[in-house]
Image (spheres, rainbow, N blue to C red):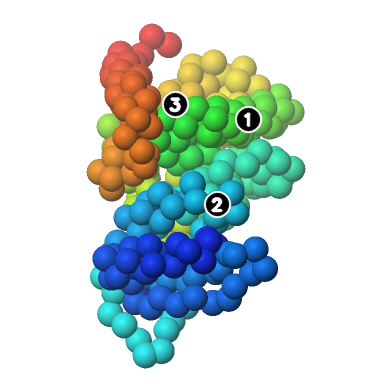
Amino acid sequence: MALKLLQVTAPIAAQKNIQKIAEKEGVIAFHKECETDDDHAVFSLLTDSTHRQTLVDMLQELSNLSPKFRINILPVDTTIPTTNTAGSSDTREELKAKMAQGALLDFNYLLLTFLSTIVALIGLLQDNIAVVIGAMVIAPFLGPNLAFAFATSLGNKGLMTYAFRTGLVGVGFASLIGVAFGYLWGAVPDSAELMGRTSIGLDGVALAVASGVAGVLSLTSGLSMTLVGVMVAVAILPPAATFGFMLGAGQVKLAYGALLMVSVNIVCVNLAGLLVFLAKGISPRRWFEKRMAKPFVYGGIMVWSVLLALLIYAIRNPFL
């Protein structure tokens, strides 16, 4: 059950329109909560995921009635008496809020990247898979990648730029930490975990695609993304750290292999994420916004597909 409470602040005169929309979309409950001193009121609509996106879109059509118009979407743990709801799905607006938060480039993001990279490198150098997986729990790489795919599906240039910058900073920062480790460490240790990140096959491509699909499905379903975040981080952080380490240690050929792996994984996660967003019907609300988003969507699919083809060719035909 995925219940949400929509609180709509609108002119009192709009009550009949809001009630008609509520009845048309089959909301579970509708009532007027309170009136304000400026001829406005707060209306509450309890709804499940079945028609929530359509409901929000129709309510937004009333936004031109007042500059004070607002929709707040609140989570609901349960309702009594209980009601049967089918599935669970977040609206476009809820996803956008999650994506913006996940792509945030701040001190916490940099700190988590630093700590997770240090822990991952220790696990790789000690050939300890448990430590590597532990580092993935705190690695913040799921947010920027899914945010970029989401922004592409909406043609949102601002969020695309922001997510790309955050993701680039994260991977670059992890690689720089790896360079420092490699320079200080010197020799390459006999570690299967470390060496396993210096080459990639088609099975690695499948893993990255699965990570992207799982990430978007968990996000759009409103489920916890912690475990999926670990899956995506496993695909990105260890090879990025390994690339930096091998570069710092002067092992250019091994660094090239790790760079191929992290590049393939990033491309696959973003391509899979974009395709799943499209399959889930994530698109702009207005027709002209959909029209403007099409070049971003088709361009994104084309660019990621071409990059993936080139990377697979490089895997099959190494020049180092």
Q: Residues within 10 Å of mark 3 (few under 14, many from 20)?
A: some
Residue placed under numbered mark 1 in the picture: 169
Quadrant in which the C terminus is drawn: top left
- Residue 79 is situated, as x and y percent measured from the top left of the image, at 42, 84
Provide the secondary structure element on which disc 3 rests. Answer: helix
Sooner in the amino-acid sequence: mark 3 or mark 1? 1
Question: Which residue is denoted by mark 3 in the rendering?
Answer: 263
Q: Residues within 10 Å of mark 1 (few under 14, many from 20)?
A: some
Residue 135, above or below 267:
below
| Residue at image coords 74%, 43% | 107
Sooner in the amino-acid sequence: mark 2 or mark 1 = 2
Q: Nearer the viewer, residue 121 or 85?
A: 85
Q: Quadrant of the N terminus?
A: bottom left
The answer to which image quadrant residue 220 occupies is bottom left
In three-dimensional space, the C-alpha distance between marks 3 and 2, rounded to whole angstroms, equals 48 Å
126 and 167: which is toward the camera: 167
Q: Which residue is mark 2?
A: 66
Q: Quadrant of residue 169?
A: top right
Query: Disc 1 residue type?
Result: Val
2 or 1: mark nearer the eye? 2
Instruction: Name the residue type under label 2.
Output: Ser
> Which residue does the image show at 49% across and 47% down from the upper left?
64
Q: Nearer the viewer, residue 183 or 33?
A: 33
Q: Report whether residue 248 is seen.
A: yes
Q: Are the residues flagged by discs 2 and 1 in contact, CB closer than 8 Å?
A: no
Q: Nearer the viewer, mark 3 or mark 2?
A: 2
C-alpha distance separating marks 2 and 1: 41 Å
Which mark sits nearer the N-terminus, 3 or 2? 2
